[in-house]
Image: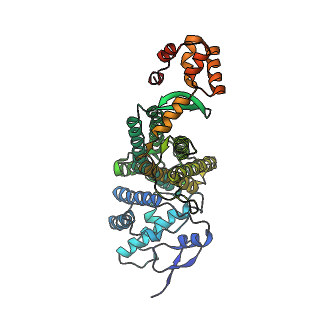
Amino acid sequence: MEKTRSEFDSIGEIEVPADRYWGAQTERALLHFQIGQEIMPQEIIFALALIKRAAAQVNSEIGNLPKNKAKYIIRACDEILAAKLNDHFPLTIWQSGSATQTNMNINEVIANRAIAFAGGKLGSKKPIHPNDDVNMSQSTNDVFPTAMHIATQLLLTKKLLPALGFLRDELQQIEKKFNKVLKIGRTHLQDALPMTLGQEFSGYVAQIDLAIKNIKAQAEHLQNLAIGGTAIGTGLNAPKQFAKKMVERLSGFMGLKFKSAPNKFCALASHDELLMTSSALKTLATALYKITNDIRWLASGPRCGLGELILPDNEPGSSIMPGKVNPTQCEVMLMVCAQVMGNDAVVSFANSQGNFELNVFKPVIIHNVLQSIHLLSNACISFGCYAIRDLKINQKQLDNFVAKSLMQVTVLNPIIGYDKSCAIAKYALLNNISLREASIKLKLLTAKEFDSVVRLHKLTS
């Protein structure tokens, strides 16, 4: 068997592997963009196949594409959607800023696979042409932004939000389980007033709730699709009803709803919706970082740290120190959050690169957004399963800190005033005695008076 076949494009002929469905433009991209290892996300290939499938249906309904051609194109798209042709999409994200090479990669694969169905010769572009038939009524400039929105909306809805909901529920279980367990609060990393562990975790739950609400709000903007704008937003070479019919075809897929972008010039030249989504992901990352770091510090020890919480022993922590166990789930979550914050910085800059009628940083934008979603989703599941679900408390340490805390003196302010309360706290600290003993020695309160006011559980409400 021959190892290659000849394909041609506007530049000329080029040899492509005989066992691959891509064509000349994909092969040239493999030659000229040997950069990095970040393959175009499968979610984008999936979304592009959906778009090509819908376009074949719409163009056939309008009467511009023969039904037999549409049938072969749809059949090829279905194989892509079934993940049967994954090896035929080799390009990295480091290519044209419009992602022309990836759009042509999928056009060529669909065309050649359709040609195979029709009994034709691969690379002949007959009876199915990658541009004239598969890319009919489309441009890379409206197809790829549409795929970006579809892929992001799909991942947010089907992966991140369920993962966030799972972690939120695990945190809430801790809140309920330890709702009455007293502990000492901390501000400025210094001892503060008493609270319950449930109250502390309720703050974490509220942060996740806010992040979920924010992500859902930003995801609504992703419903607007650029398809129908073609090259620069004017819609040249697309039938009048093409955008409307495409949105109707694409809507309902896996429960998603889409709209035709009201201004196609904006949809091609900027990606503010994806930047807003990235910003929401960054906000989530900062929340998760705070929550995780708190838990990591509260579990520090086991004997020489705060030691209020006990994380599950998942794996040995040291190759040299026997018996050491590390907060690895916390550490991986913190690294994920750092990556997401960095991804947002890239997306922010990339979105500013909309030169006139086209943003030319599309591949790096979608790579970073989708990577952030994947990382956060996986980290939330892992953290919930292997850190939060079996989290335990060190009751002895919690009681010890509460008993030694000086900031309970705050409750005395309304009774003896700030200055006298401060004198009690300082005296207790200097003489290493309790607030109760200090109050009595300074003759500011009797034991009975102190006990009637400083009631720990009352302080938490």
Q: Quadrant where the N terminus lies? A: bottom left
Looking at the image, which is closer to me, 107 or 385?
385
| Residue visible at 45% across and 50% down in the picture | 312
Is residue 73 positioned above or below 415 on the image?
A: below
Tell whether 139 sits left or right of 171: right
Is residue 309 positioned above or below 246 on the image?
A: above
Looking at the image, which is closer to me, 16 or 381?
381
- Total numbered labels placed on residues in the image: 0
Looking at the image, which is closer to me, 171 or 83?
171
Q: Colour scheme used in the picture?
A: rainbow
Q: Is residue 252 visible?
A: no
Q: Position of residue 113 (x, y in %)?
A: 40, 72
Q: Is residue 363 visible?
A: yes
Q: Position of residue 65 (x, y in %)?
A: 38, 62
| Residue visible at 52% across and 62% down in the picture | 40
Q: Quadrant where the C terminus lies? A: top left
Looking at the image, which is closer to me, 12 or 416?
416
Tell whether 306 sits left or right of 126: right
Q: Position of residue 195 (x, y in %)?
A: 48, 29
The answer to which quarter of the image holds residue 223 is top left
Q: Position of residue 216 (x, y in %)?
A: 44, 40
Is residue 178 positioned above or below 117 on the image?
A: above
- Check the image and name the residue furthest to the front: 441
